[in-house]
Amino acid sequence: MTEGNEMAYHIFFEAYFNRLWRYLLVAAAGNEDAARESLQATLIRVARHIKPFRDETVFWSWLTVLARSAYKDETRKRRRYFSFLDRFTMHVTVVLENPAVADADEKLLAMLSSQMALLPPDEQKLIEEKYFAHRSVRELAEELQITEKAVESRLSRIRSKLKAAALAKLNDETRA
Amino acid sequence: MKPEPEQKRLLNDVALEGADFREAMLGQTLRVVRRRRHGRQAGRAVVLFLALGIASFLVYRHTGRHSSPTEAQTVSRPYRLVQTIPLPVAALVSTQPFTNAVIAFSSAVQIVQTTPASGNFRVLNDDELLASVARPAVLMRIDAHSERLIFVNSDGEKDLEPH
């Protein structure tokens, strides 16, 4: 990566893109737009400042520092934008930073579990069959007597619902 | 608590649901990587070019100093080259041959004999002798022990004659 090898960046994306995205979702308190902008800024900072690290833990710590600073910059930018809007609308928007994102995955997972418990039984069952019983989409389609595409569509809807609920909860927790 | 692989897979899928910007971000990042790589390559090329330029300048100066013609002449030739410039015409002094090339000596020259014993004389050297006469004159060496004072104008001889 330090030499600008593109294949190395593909491998890096494979290994860290999702993890960074989840980290930033928590850091941005569920604000997807801010998380997306921050993620792009983080990746560009990685490309600009990449250096050798002695182990993976140190590398991940460095990535989180970059992600947090990118998010802070993004927040600052957004605050300027919002304060500009406030001057017209006289509406006060409170944007709080999430102070603790030490283990973003753990936090997200806890929220996901609590949101899963609130799903209707058929949706819960579908998710459990797919992710915990390791059943393929084809098997699920045969069992439900619907097409694979329909199963995919249902799964996608449930995931979207879970995501929206988890992000909303993250946001509420940060504001509280 | 470390999430189980199943939980992690679900977490991942849920987090990425609707987030189809991965390829766009990869493309954007790779553009930055390429730009930086090209910048680095250009920087290296500039450094290499400068190094080559400096090296060739130093080599040129080094070899140029040895092959300098003036220095080569100074070292190898056993003489010193002196450059002259022509004088202006006004500064030139021209001479003309005498019209009376032969100067006749008169036999009535009085020769004064001196002896060391008399003590009433002082030995003059050539310069003092020439300085003592106010007329143009030359001192002509005849042999190893005798010289003759010759006046360009014969009037000078008269001045020298005792009165």
Image (cartoon, coloured by chain):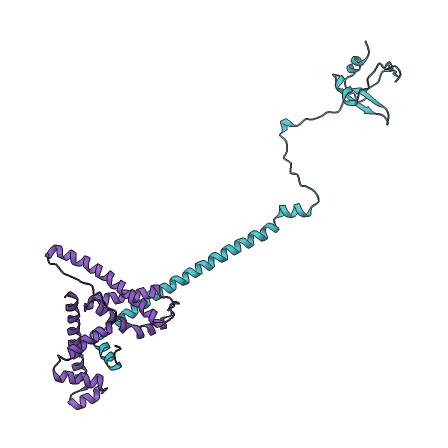
Chain colours: A purple, B cyan
The residue under the point 47% across, 60% down is B48
Q: Residue at 63% of width from left, 28% of height from top?
A: B89
**Going by the image, does A107 lie left or right of B92?**
left
Quadrant for residue A2, please give it.
bottom left
Q: Is residue B74 above or below residue B120?
A: below
From this viewpoint, is residue B65 visible?
yes
View extreme (top): residue: B163
- Quadrant that contains the C terminus of chain A: bottom left
> Looking at this view, is B53 or A167 the one in front?
A167
Which quadrant of the figure contains the N terminus of chain A? bottom left
Q: Residue at x 71, y 44 (%)?
A: B78
* Position in image of residue B6 (x %, y %): 24, 82
Furthest residue in direction front, as rendered: B1
Q: Is residue A132 above or below residue B163?
A: below
Decide: is B140 above or below A20: above
Q: Nearer the viewer, residue B58 or A15?
A: A15
Badge count: 0
Q: Is residue B152 left or right of residue A148?
A: right
Residue A127 spot, x, y in % from top left: 18, 83
> Which residue appears at 17% of the width and 87% of the height?
A147
Residue B118 in picture, x, y percent from top left: 88, 14
Please tell me which residue lies in front, B85 or A68. Answer: A68
Q: Is residue A157 visible?
A: no
Q: Quadrant of residue B33?
A: bottom left
B54 with respect to A71 (left or right): right
Residue A17's x, y, as percent?
28, 72
